[in-house]
Each structure stands twice: as structure tokens, then as C-alpha cells.
Image (cartoon, helix red, strand yellow):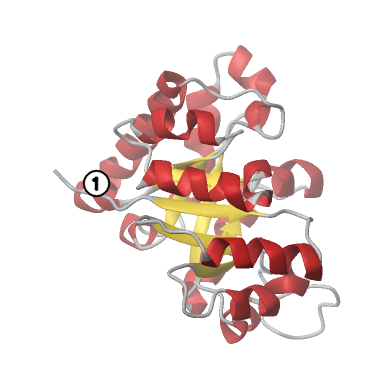
Amino acid sequence: MTTRRKLVAANWKMNGSLDTNAAWLAELRAGRWTCDVAVCAPFVYLAQVRDGLAGVAADLGAQNLSVEKPGAFTGEVAGEMLIDIGCRWVIVGHSERRGLYGETNEIVAAKAVCAFAVGLRPIVCVGETLAEREAGRTLEVVGAQLDAVLKRCTVAQLAQAALAYEPVWAIGTGRTATPAQAQEVHAAIRAQLAHADAAAAASTRILYGGSVKPANAAELFAQADIDGGLIGGAALVAKDFLAICSAAG
């Protein structure tokens, strides 16, 4: 049986300030954890977070990247720039990027390719809306999202990075997929990976993202195919984020 080290990634989304970030980082530095940790901050704070994580067992991550190489693309940020400033991780295809900014399965796959090309580890997000779940289409939708990535990336590559299942109806709503609901989708994702490469699938980390809190983290992380979390709202409070990391340990 493959033992996968848990990964807990903070997604600050469009939140933070120099002062609140400094206080958060100070609290993180005082904490202890035994899982892998990444902090995905807004672009403008990446340098501050990088410096705040110096000497700490946590990696810097970004929340998005461009599919373009550096050049005349005003307002975009290239993967090469993220590597240059010290990022190791980047979130790709978050449901807010898909839903609010029109990122298609193909765009998400292209961003994963770009991340791998420069040495970034993408956290590739998949997940269904409430309407899709209620229509019984969860596995169909998630399968199609993952299939687009597998047409461009290998499972062996994904095993060096991570996937994240985030039911859109459970993000920022206070609703959480039950551990059994989440495990069902995680198991289906791993089975889809295994169809292409069983050995790599067994070592690929699949995170859960969707209103993870200190109160429910341990039960979620105890599921066979849930290998950590992509944490949104709870990651804005350092104490809560550390409690979730502890649950993963």
C-alpha cells in the first residue's frame, strides 16, 4: 500500500494586507505540523509571504498563472515569474476561475502544462456545481474535467503535483460534502488515474476543498483517498489553518 504524505494548502483568494499577512505569518512560524504545507497568496504579496516563510517547513504558492510566455500580455503573470520569486506550487482551474472568468477544461489543462514546463507543481482543481450534483452528473463532470488534463499531462507528472476535488456547492457556503460523498469522488478520480497509470495513481495526492474547518478536517482526512485539503476561508485565520494542519498530521 502506498503511503501518501498529507498536503494542506492555504488559498487566501483575494484577501490580505501587509499588516494582516505579517501577523498571520508570525502565528504560522510559532506553530508545528507534520504534513506538507503550501501558502497560496495573491501575486502582490508573494514576496512578503516568501520572506515570512524563510526557515519554515512550508512552500510558497500562487493562485493562477498565464498560459503565455513572458511578453506583451498586460496584467498577466507567467510561470517563469512565479518560479523567479520562489513559488513551488500554483493553483490551476479553481472553480472561481472556471465560473467567474470562463476558464474551460482546455484552458485549465493548458495552464497545468505551463506549470509543469517551468518546474511548478500545479494543484489542479475539479468539481461540480449544485445543479450538476442534483442531476446525478458529478462523476461525469469531474471525469471530463480530469480527462482534459490527462490528454495533456501524464499521471506520473500529476503524482509530483496534486489534484483537488472541490464541490462548487460547498465552497464558502458552509455546506460540506459528507466524508462519504467526498471519498466517493476521490476514489473515482483515483480510479480514472489508475486506468492510465496504476502505480502513479497510487501515489498521487488528491486534496479536498470545500468548507474544510478544524471541526471536520480530521474526519475528512481519515478517508482512504483524501490526502489533505485546499483550504479557503479557514486559511485566513492562522489558528484555524494550523488546527487543520494538525488534523492532517
Q: Dot 1 lies on which element?
A: helix
Quarter of the image where the N terminus is located? top left
Q: At 61% across and 33% down in the image, what residue appears?
A: 211
Q: Residue furthest left?
A: 1
Residue 241 showing in the rendered view = yes
Could you tell whether 164 is left or right of 72 in the image?
left
Q: At 59% across and 86% down in the image, what residue appears?
A: 84
Indicate the position of residue 214 as horizontal and vertical percent values: 53, 36
Could you tell whether 194 is left or right of 241 in the image?
left
Count every numbered label the image shows and give the total: 1
Indicate the position of residue 113 as horizontal and vertical percent values: 51, 66
Q: Residue furthest right?
A: 74
Q: At 81% across and 65% down in the image, what residue appears?
A: 17
Image quadrant where residue 213 sits: top right
Which of 95 and 194 lies nearest the eye of the viewer?
A: 95
Is the residue 175 above or below the residue 97 in the image? above
Which of 1 and 104 lies nearest the eye of the viewer?
A: 1
Q: At 49% across and 43% down in the image, what residue appears?
A: 244
Residue that numbered label 1 is attached to: 202
Residue 90 showing in the rendered view = no
Indicate the position of residue 166 as horizontal and vertical percent values: 57, 37
Is the residue 51 above or below the residue 194 in the image? below
The amino acid sitting under disc 1 is: Ala
Indicate the position of residue 77 as horizontal and vertical percent values: 73, 75
Disc 1 crowd rating (10 Å Cα; few below 14, some 14-19, many 20+) is some
Which of 226 and 92 lies nearest the eye of the viewer?
A: 226
